[in-house]
Structure formats: structure tokens, C-alpha cells
Image (cartoon, rainbow, N blue to C red):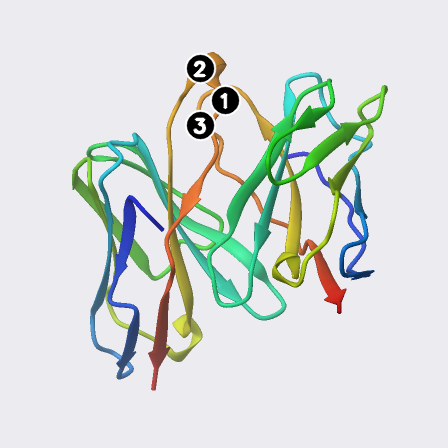
Amino acid sequence: DAKTTQPNSMESNEEEPVHLPCNHSTISGTDYIHWYRQLPSQGPEYVIHGLTSNVNNRMASLAIAEDRKSSTLILHRATLRDAAVYYCILRVNSGNTPLVFGKGTRLSVIA
Amino acid sequence: DAGITQSPRHKVTETGTPVTLRCHQTENHRYMYWYRQDPGHGLRLIHYSYGVKDTDKGEVSDGYSVSRSKTEDFLLTLESATSSQTSVYFCAISDIRDRGLYGYTFGSGTRLTVV
């Protein structure tokens, strides 16, 4: 799997927007950009994914750079329950290549 | 998580004993995975299955075996547990959906301690 680079940690104030960056300069044309998060003492959970266009769902938005070498996960209004480790993962959409998790970004939310 | 359960949730075992962890799904998903998570290493893939009786090794498969005799169950066995296998084990499921895009659903994890 192509490599992604994320900051080790970030901090946000409650009720403020959060922009979590991810660099993936070696991304290939068939790689989808996936985001997962892991709340304390839980398994990871799917957040969002995209290929080229920006994506929105009830949890978050995904902004993908035009050259696809970077992306940003946007939490529009951080809550204390959003404190988690966020993983940015590139996923080939052919067959079933298992997800490979990196270290992710630990997001702290301050009340 | 709804549709996927892991058992047991916690287990303490002695070095050298066999241990089997169970992952059970009710989603009829084709793909199932076992990961382990350790401080400083994040989540690492142990084994995965792409169908009944079809399995493959992941990054850290040494010391582990798996079996999948039916769609809903994926068993992870430590033939002779060692202290280095003390970890939190996560099972995940996924499937092919519209346009081939699919996400993973993870279980709540099994905390295994080998003493």
C-alpha cells in the first residue's frame, strides 16, 4: 500500500472545526482515500472515503486536493466525543487488499 | 458493534497453552480479518479470509493460525501462547458493495494476557 503521512497529534477546542491533514504523494490512480477513527478502548470505525471529488456524510467531510497528493478530513464542529486517533489509509479498489493502518493522528478536544 | 461480536472479551492464559478467539458476524460479509494492536505498533494484520476456507497471511502471522468453516465464524488460534502475544485483538468484516466500494466494521476487541 502507498504510504500516508499524518501529524502525530492535534488539538482542537470544542465546537470549533477541525482539519486533519494527510499527505499521500505516491498515491496511484486506483487508490481510494479512506479515513477511520478509533475512540478510546474501542475498535476502529469507518468515517469516510473518496477517490477524486470531495465527499460529505453525517460524520465528516473529505476534501481531496486536485492532484490527489493530499487530503483533509474536516470535522465541522468538534465535540468531546470526537477525541480519537484518526487514520488516513490508501486502499486499492481491486479485489480485497486488506487495510494497512499507520500510526494516525491523535486528536484531543478541549472543552 | 452490531453484526459482529468477538469472544471472549477478556482472557488470561498461561504461556504454552492453546487459545482460540472467535469472531462471529451476522452480516453475511465475505471478508473477515484479524488484527492485533499494541502500544507503539498500531494495528497490524494477522490473517484474513476472503471466503469459506479461503485464508491468507498478514504482516504478523507467525504463531497464529485461522479457520473459517462457515461464513459467519472466523477463528484465531494461538497454538502455544507466548508473552509476546499479549495484545488486544480486533476482528473486522467487509464486503463488496455498489461500485466495489466497501468499508470495514470492527468488533469491540479481545484483550488477551499471556502470563
Residue A12 in the image: above or below residue B94: below
**Disc 2 residue type (three-letter):** Asp
Q: Nearer the viewer, residue B83 or B35?
A: B35
Q: Give me the residue at 84% from left, 25% from top.
A: A65
The image quarter containing residue B112 is: bottom left
The residue tagged with tag 1: helix, strand or loop?
Answer: loop
The residue tagged with tag 2: helix, strand or loop?
Answer: helix
Q: Dot 3, crowdedness within 10 Å: few (<14), some or many (≥20)?
A: some
Residue behind mark 2: B98
Q: Chain of mark 3?
A: A
Residue B99 spot, x, y in % from top left: 48, 13
Are callouts 1 and 3 both on one chain?
A: no
Residue behind mark 1: B101
Q: Dot 1, crowdedness within 10 Å: few (<14), some or many (≥20)?
A: some
Location of the N terminus of chain A by quadrant is top right
Q: Dot 2, crowdedness within 10 Å: few (<14), some or many (≥20)?
A: few
Q: Chain of mark 1?
A: B
Marks 3 and 2 in Cβ contact (< 8 Å): no
**Disc 3 residue type (three-letter):** Asn
Q: Residue furthest bottom?
A: B115
Residue B38 in the image: above or below residue A75: below
What is the CA distance from the residue labelled 2 to the residue labelled 1? 6 Å
Residue A68 in the image: above or below residue A9: above
What is the CA distance from the residue labelled 1 to the residue labelled 3? 10 Å
Q: Which mark is residue A96?
A: 3
Q: Nearer the viewer, residue B47 or B100?
A: B100
Q: Residue furthest front?
A: A15
What is the CA distance from the residue labelled 3 to the residue labelled 2? 15 Å
